[in-house]
Amino acid sequence: MKIIDLRSDTVTLPTDNMLRVMKNAHLGDDVFEEDPTVNKLEEKSAEIFGKESALIVPSGTMANLISVLAHCERGTEVILGDKAHTFLYEAGGIAAFGGVHPRTLPNAKNGTINLDEIRSAIRSDNVHFPRTGLISLENTHNICYGSPLSKEYIDSVAIVAKSNNLPLHIDGARIFNASIALNLPVNTLIENVDSISFCLSKGLSCPIGSVICGKSDFISKTRRIRKGLGGGMRQAGIIAAPGLLALDEMIVRIKEDHLNAKILAEGINSIKGLHVELNLVKTNIVYFELEDNLQEIDKVVVDLDKKGIKFFAIGLNRFRMVTNRGIDSFDIDRTLVELSSYFESI
Ligand SMILES: *Cc1c(COP(=O)(O)O)cnc(C)c1O
């Protein structure tokens, strides 16, 4: 029986082509900036995102941590959503390692933060206050239904940031999902942003890695911080090679993940007792809720795991499924069959 793993798009395994380019990659010592494959990936990333420079790092978590540390001094504050990955799921790293204070504002269901709330959260010069150092957004927004943030919204936050002399960072772990959902190239989508991190290891199916893009002096700073955190890697071309391949070959196929997510969402919503906010399903993440709260949600996850369907319970009566390259339309059908027979039997 095939295991249908809908826990995340991080579970995707490297393709045969990726393994081949890893084996054949030209390598050097990247701490000396002498790995030609890494240099190529960084140049290509910077070009695709329309920024001056880029840096490969081991993970999305480290990409965000390094970006925040490069923008913010100790004791300053970053404005971010209360459902931001950086706030919820990155081990408190910005506080633990950077001494940076998270100023959380409520995320709307679509992942945005109210502009007036951002404006009024920016600190005035007063000895009682920490100084504001950064505004950070997430696109697509993982916990907020995988919502893509529009260019208009990002630009309006960028104007607030600029008029207050603050940098704007985007946690773009799934920025290509946003780009595809909005039908806009990533460089247009984030043209008014100072820095962005994106993951190679999610929908793009690479085994490891994330990339930070921004201005050259910012990237020089991130390079030093990466070294300090122990993230300087030697023959990192092994990681960069599938990254380069993914930027060529793996972006367009994300469309399939979005289509599968839509079919999955509609199917789940038609199962008695389950509810999906269908209008919020725009990328590869599907959240569904139990209409009554009676189930033990962890038991649901364990029971369906026994049927070969893996997903997460996130929140009080909420579940998350993430479509990815390992999931085809037969898997979606089988998931729906298993879910409906399970929920009809209880
Ligand atoms: C997965 C994810 C990250 C972190 O990526 P890792 O490589 O798992 O550390 C950051 N931000 C968002 C929104 C994510 O979904």
Image: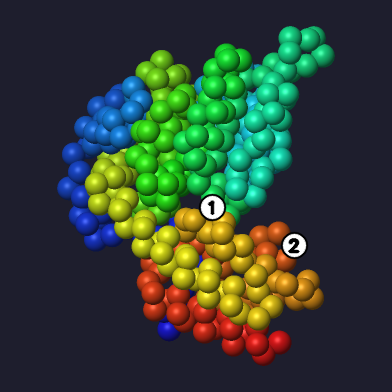
Q: Nearer the viewer, residue 228 or 190?
A: 190
Q: Secondary structure at mark 1?
A: loop
- Count of number-bearing discs: 2
Mark whose residue sits in front, 1 or 2:
1
Q: How is the image coloured?
A: rainbow
Say what amino acid the circle numbered 2 marks.
Answer: Leu
Q: Position of residue 139 (x, y in %)?
A: 51, 42
Q: Is residue 296 left or right of residue 66?
A: right
Q: Which residue is mark 1?
A: 146
Q: CA distance from mark 1 to mark 2?
A: 18 Å
**Which quadrant, please, contains the N terminus?**
bottom left
Residue 200 placed where, x, y %? 38, 46
Report x, y in % for residue 331: 42, 76
Q: Quadrant of the C terminus?
A: bottom right
In this rendering, the answer to whether 321 lies above or below 115 is: below
Q: Position of residue 283 (x, y in %)?
A: 47, 56
Residue at image location 37% in from the left, 42% down from the top: 184
* 330 vs 233, nearest the viewer: 330
Indicate left or right for 170 with 288 as reference: left
Identity, as a three-letter code, of the amino acid under mark 1? Gly
Q: Is residue 154 above or below residue 32?
A: below
Query: Where is residue 243, by image quadrant?
Result: top left
Front-most of residues 235 and 200: 200
Mark toward the start of the polypeptide (1 vs 2): 1
Residue occupying the point 79% across, 76% down? 294
Residue picked out by circle 2: 316
Q: Does residue 29 sit above or below 8 in this rendering?
A: above
For label 2, the crowd category at 10 Å Cα-Cα, with few meaning under 14, some 14 to 19 and many 20 or more, is few
**Residue at position x 78%, y 10% from top?**
126
Q: Secondary structure at mark 2?
A: loop
Q: Residue at coordinates 49% horizontally, 56% vertically from top-left?
A: 282
Left or right: residue 341 versus residue 140 is: right
